[in-house]
């Protein structure tokens, strides 16, 4: 039984819960999460109170609209595909004033500018790539990309064993001592519908607004 799910800012999750026995009380909570010494406070919060009393209407034995006896399709996976390219990007930031960066390895950190002339990354439509994202900052960040989905292949250099497809993933803060927290993502650029120019960024609003954003262009 899964007791907790980590959902980054802007992330989504769908799940079914087992309610407590009749006349017992339970809560669905957001646990305290350490975003690092430079991060925001995220204390314990109550999301919902579950009161399994006998005062409410009786529930149906089946959920409406869900066919009985039909299994959900297996999740899609990108694990069997061979990446054509490996890219490395990293989160970093500066203080006084606070400026946030997401940088392609080998380039100087630069805050996003809406008056950009060239994209940060150019990808050929039809390709599958691996992107390694590192967090070199003392607070947590959340990588998000528009238009497509990716699969988490590794976390901190170890296999992730996660078949789900995502567009947002969390990166814990760097403690200043150990290796940078990292994820390896298998990016799927095969759809012809994603040809064009779009964004990738941290999904914490304050961070993307203060520069932690980049431009990607998918070409034929």
Image (cartoon, rainbow, N blue to C red):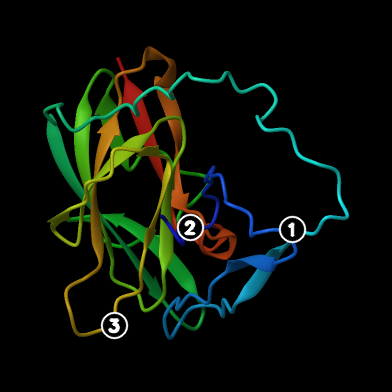
- Of circles 3 and 1, the one toward us is 1
- For label 2, the crowd category at 10 Å Cα-Cα, with few meaning under 14, some 14 to 19 and many 20 or more, is some
Q: Residue at x 65, y 29 (%)?
A: 62
Q: Residue at x 60, y 77 (%)?
A: 44
Q: Residue at x 23, y 30 (%)?
A: 78
Q: Nearer the viewer, residue 76 or 147?
A: 76
**Label 3 to label 1: alpha-carbon separation:** 43 Å
Mark 3 or mark 1: which comes first in sequence?
1
- Helix, strand or loop for disc 2: loop
From the image, tell me which residue sits under label 3. 175
Pointers 2 and 3 in contact (CB under 8 A)? Answer: no
Mark 2 or mark 1: which comes first in sequence?
2
Q: Is residue 17 left or right of residue 76?
A: right
From the image, tell me which residue sits under label 2. 8
Query: Quadrant of the rendered structure where residue 2 is?
Result: bottom left
- Of circles 2 and 1, the one toward us is 1
Pointers 3 and 1 in contact (CB under 8 A)? Answer: no
- For label 1, the crowd category at 10 Å Cα-Cα, with few meaning under 14, some 14 to 19 and many 20 or more, is some
**Label 2 to label 1: alpha-carbon separation:** 30 Å
Q: Nearer the viewer, residue 46 or 120?
A: 46
Considering only vertical position in the picture, is 186 above or below 27? Answer: above
From the image, tell me which residue sits under label 1. 52
| Residue 17 image point, x, y percent | 57, 50
Q: Residue at x 67, y 33 (%)?
A: 61
Quadrant location, the N terminus: bottom left
Quadrant location, the C terminus: top left
């Amino acid at each position: 039984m899964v007791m907790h799910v980590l959902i980054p800012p802007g992330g989504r999750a769908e799940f079914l819960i087992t309610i407590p026995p009749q006349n017992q009380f339970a809560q669905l909570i957001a646990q305290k999460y350490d975003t690092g010494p430079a991060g925001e406070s995220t204390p314990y919060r109550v999301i919902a109170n579950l009161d399994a009393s006998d005062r409410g209407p009786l529930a149906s034995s089946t959920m409406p609209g869900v066919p009985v006896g039909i299994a959900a399709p297996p999740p899609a996976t990108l694990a069997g595909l061979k990446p054509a390219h490996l890219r490395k990007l990293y989160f970093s930031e500066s203080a006084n004033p606070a400026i946030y960066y997401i940088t392609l390895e080998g380039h100087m950190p630069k805050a996003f500018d809406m008056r950009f002339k060239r994209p940060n990354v150019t990808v050929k439509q039809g390709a599958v790539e691996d992107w390694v994202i590192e967090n070199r900052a003392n607070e947590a960040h959340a990588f998000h990309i528009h238009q497509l989905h990716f699969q988490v292949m590794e976390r901190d250099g170890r296999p992730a064993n996660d078949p789900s497809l995502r567009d947002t993933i969390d990166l814990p803060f760097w403690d200043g001592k150990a290796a940078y927290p990292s994820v390896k993502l298998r990016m799927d650029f095969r759809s012809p519908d994603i040809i064009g120019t779009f964004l990738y960024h941290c999904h914490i609003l304050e961070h993307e607004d203060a520069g932690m954003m980049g431009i990607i262009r998918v070409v034929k």
